[in-house]
Image (tube, rainbow, N blue to C red):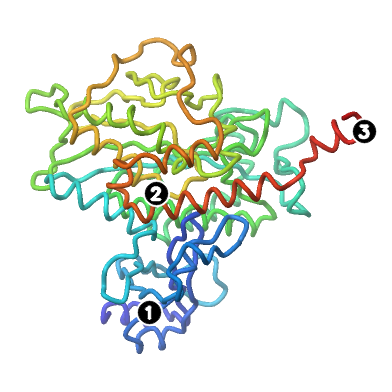
Amino acid sequence: MQDSANWLHSHGIRTVECLFSDITGSARGKVVPSASLLATSELRFSQVGLVQSVSGHCLQQLVPELDPDMRLLPDTSTLRQLPWSREPAAMLIHDCLHEDGSLVEFAPRNVLKRVLARYAERGLTPVVAPEMEFYLFARRNSLDAAPQAPACYGTTSDSLRQPYSLDRLHDLDAVLGDIQHGCQCLGIGADTLLQEVGCGQLEINLQHGDAIALADQAFLFKRMVREAAARHNLEACFMAKPLADDAGSAMHIHQSLVYADSGRNAFSQDNGQPAPRFAHYIAGLQHYLPDALLLLAPYVNSFRRLAPFTAAPINVEWGYDNRTCGLRIPHGGPQARRVENRLPGVDANPYLALATTLACGLLGMQQELQPTAPLDSSAYGRPYAFPRTQLEAAERLAANAELAAVLGPQFVATYCQLKLSEWQEFNRQVSPWEYRHLLSQA
């Protein structure tokens, strides 16, 4: 920690946010004075902090009966200055450990580490690059209010929707400048920015790299964008489908494998042709992603995004540069050979989304599965291949022992119980649609 102590002193840091990701992808943790952080051997936190529902309910039954603490182990490589703090402050991501030093099974960062360890055993290292789509809306006065486009977008229909327009980006110069500054402060490798199809929808791509580092970046990116938007009287939205008649928001994940000893692309042979494991990997995604959907589409709203002719997939067909497919193979040379998984919504926990797609590919390689033929036509003409509801998705994930073996049986059981509780809570609500159409007519 000596290097960290020097860094904290040189930057005049007074407090440090000691944080971790819960299952939903929200930041949990403690704010600790810098001097106290350096003086203590380690921090502790209740395991309940990992299993909060999206509505804020604490599911005590998902942790051991005595509600023990977990140890928080700092990853000092993640120490960064907070760009939004008035006083000099920093943040530091922590890993969650049991008292004996073993990893807490249902901590999302640990789930990803578990999968990566399986790759390391095979001498392989995943390389990933998430694409982050999100909306910027005018700030609402009520949590129940529908979102509206930012005022700077104007009010006429022609001005509201301008896909890929550079002028639309200029309208958001101030907030985008803060987002760019936030990326620099937090070590987020933002690569490309574009105005997406939806009104107020943006996409920022992250530079490819190590899976843990990119999951950390995506986790911090969502938090930072929300903070930046709030300073400009805007609200950042990472829902998968916030508007019924507009585009949904995805977190497409580009993924490849390299040999750990050489860095050469393991999806390619020496002659430049696809290696057999490339086909096995694609087949693993095809075979297991439908059962793993709950990890990539975690909320009731997530399923609204998966509809035909909306730039979102409805099946696990694959094809070369075919954006109607769930699995797209971008053009590129042998060293750039990769798969783009277009299924995850941006509402997914980045650690779990990366762990899931890598787990599915790993199972395909282990079993030497064979994919279907690549599709050179629209995949929207093929059948829908996914669970239709959060309940069905939870049942399918819970029943897949092979996925549980890779991701961790305790994690999968905990995750499914948490999502079932959210499903039950959602279905206890009476919706505005029911009042409008049923109250006086049923």
Q: Please tell me whether residue 45 is drawn above or below residue 288 in the rendered image.
A: below
Horizontal side, residue 167 vs residue 92: left or right: right
Q: Quadrant of the C terminus?
A: top right
Tell me the quarter of the picture where residue 427 sits: top right
Report if the CB atoms under discs 3 and 1 are less than 8 Å apart: no
Q: Position of residue 397 (x, y in %)?
A: 42, 41
Name of the residue lying farthest toward the right: 440
* Amino acid at circle 2: Leu
Q: Residue at x 32, y 54 (%)?
A: 213
Tell me the quarter of the picture where residue 332 sits: top left
- Alpha carbons under labels 1 and 2: distance apart: 31 Å
State the mark number for residue 8: 1
- Alpha carbons under labels 3 and 1: distance apart: 64 Å
Q: Nearer the viewer, residue 342 or 214?
A: 342
Q: Which residue is mark 3?
A: 440
Q: Residue at x 20, y 28 (%)?
A: 278
Q: Secondary structure at mark 2?
A: helix
Q: Please tell me whether residue 406 is drawn above or below residue 74 in the rendered image.
A: above
Horizontal side, residue 282 vs residue 307: left or right: left
Q: Nearer the viewer, residue 238 or 438?
A: 438
Sequence-wise first label, 1 or 2:
1
Q: Which residue is mark 2?
A: 352
Sequence-wise first label, 3 or 1:
1
Q: Position of residue 167 (x, y in %)?
A: 60, 34
